[in-house]
Image (tube, rainbow, N blue to C red):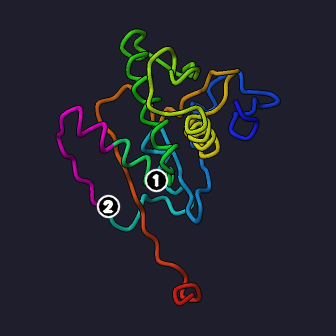
Amino acid sequence: MSGDTQSRPLATPPTSNPFISGAKEVQVQQKTVKTRTTPRELMDSNAGEVGAGVIHVIEGVDEEHFMEALTDGVRAAFDLGGAGYEVFRVVLVEYQQAKKSDGHCESLTLFYSDRQLNGKKTEMNETQFQCGLNELLSKGVLSQKASDQYWLNQALFFNGSGVILIKEYRLLPANLRDV
């Protein structure tokens, strides 16, 4: 493993899942991505409203389309690159399998060795895996728990059968519109 691509353990990793304590916010390029586990947390406490107008469309889809919408939505929201997106997809599969066997899953072991993730063959090489993993860590999708163990952001890895992907548009102040 090269030192440049290896994820570095945190000096003091959290002892409990940091994503459960409520709202999380991360800067991704020129936007802020907020993850919440309850709709009430989406409200702007200063304004006391969700927004001036909300269009909420509910669409029934099969499992394949659901997973595609979820992965594409996370990719767009967090501006995931190719490696980050591919690692997110395999982490999501690992989560689904762990959830089915345990019923509840807050963290996962992600052990990469010899073109295998957790003993299962993968198309990713080690550099791709480490780059993607580092991207997910830096963008608040995962948080390191221990060596090869990661807390899951509960807004992205959940037990429900639906997902709400919200993109909010706000008018820029007049002095920034022409910049």
Answer with the quarter of the image where residue 134 lies. top right
Which residue does the numbered mark 1 point to in the structure image?
A: 77
* Between discs 1 and 2, the one toward the N terminus: 2
Q: Is residue 55 magenta?
A: yes
- Percent position of residue 158, x then y: 41, 29
- For image coordinates 18% across by 39% down, the residue present is 61
Q: Name, please, the residue furthest toward the right.
A: 11
Amino acid type of the residue that numbered disc 1 sits on in the rendered structure: Ala
Amino acid type of the residue that numbered disc 2 sits on in the rendered structure: Val
Query: Which tag is nearer the camera, tag 1 or tag 2?
Result: 1
- Percent position of residue 26, x then y: 61, 51
Q: Secondary structure at mark 2?
A: loop
Query: In the image shown, does 63 or 130 lie closer to the viewer?
Result: 130
- For image coordinates 58% across by 56% down, the residue present is 28
Answer with the quarter of the image where residue 62 lies. top left
Q: Name, please, the residue furthest toward the top.
A: 101
Q: Quarter of the image containing the N terminus?
A: top right
Q: Secondary structure at mark 1?
A: helix
- Percent position of residue 127, x then y: 60, 37
Q: Is residue 56 left or right of residue 24?
A: left
Which residue does the numbered mark 2 point to in the structure image?
A: 54
On screen, residue 56 above or below 120: below
Q: Quarter of the image containing the C terminus?
A: bottom right
On screen, residue 78 above or below 116: below
Q: Which residues are the magenta region?
A: 54-69
On screen, residue 103 above or below 144: above
Q: Alpha carbon of mark 1 to alpha carbon of mark 2: how far?
A: 18 Å
Crowd around label 2: few <14 · some 14–19 · many ≥20 (10 Å): few
- For image coordinates 66% across by 29% down, the residue present is 144
Give the label on residue 88, or none.
none
